[in-house]
Amino acid sequence: MIKINLNPKKKEKINFQEFSLPDVSTLLSNPYVIGSVIGGLIFLEIGYMFYLDLKKNRLLDKKQDLVSEKERLKKIEKKIKNLKLSIKYQKNLTEKIKLEGKIYKKLAEQKGDFRPMLAKVGSSLPDGVWLRQVKLSRDKTEINGFAFNPNYISSYYDNLSQYYKNVSLSSTKRETKKKNKTKDIHYYSFSLVMNGWKKPSNSEDKN
């Protein structure tokens, strides 16, 4: 069974005691209050100075890190520069080696071309003829020598004409050399100039 109170009692109002802030002049006249305020300000200033010092140290550390990083980047940049120079040097060296290889190959080919010439100059030499100097080139061949009989020089001339289109006796001279006080030796010096090399056939080369 539910009871319903039709005449509820009114709640009593609670009266709060009135209060007021203390007077500022009263607070300022209190040395403990003044000391507490000053102490708080000093504490705040010290704390702020500590914060600034901490922040300054962090910035200095960051600056040092940046300086170290800059030095590291400089070293890396220097290594890259040296590497580029090394690559350039190696590239130039490779090109130089290639060029020298081509030169050596060309010289080897020319040497191969001169070999049959020199062989025929030697094989055409008759007995009684001695050579002092032989100059070979693509354009011409020059021979200096001597013989005790001019007929030997003529034979040599004829032999060389088989392998050169043009053979000329540029100079010949009778010379005398004293062997001792009572006897002289007579000989003939000569110079031959040839051009228009006739390349021999393979069968002639084998012979």
Image (cartoon, helix red, strand yellow):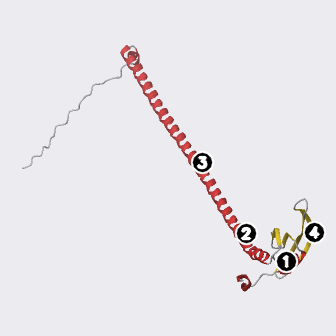
Asked if the residues shown at circle 2 and circle 3 are in contact, with their CB atoms under 8 angstroms apart, the answer is: no
SS category of the residue bearing label 2: helix
Q: Residue at x 70, y 67 (%)?
A: 104
Instruction: Judge left or right: residue 173 versus residue 8.
Output: right
- Report the amino acid beneath label 4: Arg
> Does residue 96 lie above or below 32 as drawn?
below
Instruction: Judge left or right: residue 160 versus residue 74.
Output: right
3D distance between C-alphas at marks 3 and 1 = 71 Å
Q: Which residue is mark 3?
A: 78
Q: Which residue is mark 4?
A: 174
Compare marks 4 and 2 and give the one earlier in the sequence. 2
- Report the amino acid beneath label 3: Lys
3D distance between C-alphas at marks 4 and 3 = 75 Å
Identify which residue, 142 or 180, lies in the foreground.
180
3D distance between C-alphas at marks 1 and 4 = 17 Å
Asked if the residues shown at circle 3 and circle 1 are in contact, with their CB atoms under 8 angstroms apart, the answer is: no
Q: Which residue is mark 1?
A: 156
- Report the amino acid beneath label 1: Tyr
3D distance between C-alphas at marks 2 and 3 = 43 Å
The tag on residue 107 is 2
- Say whether residue 30 is visible: no
SS category of the residue bearing label 1: helix
Quadrant in which the C terminus appears: bottom right
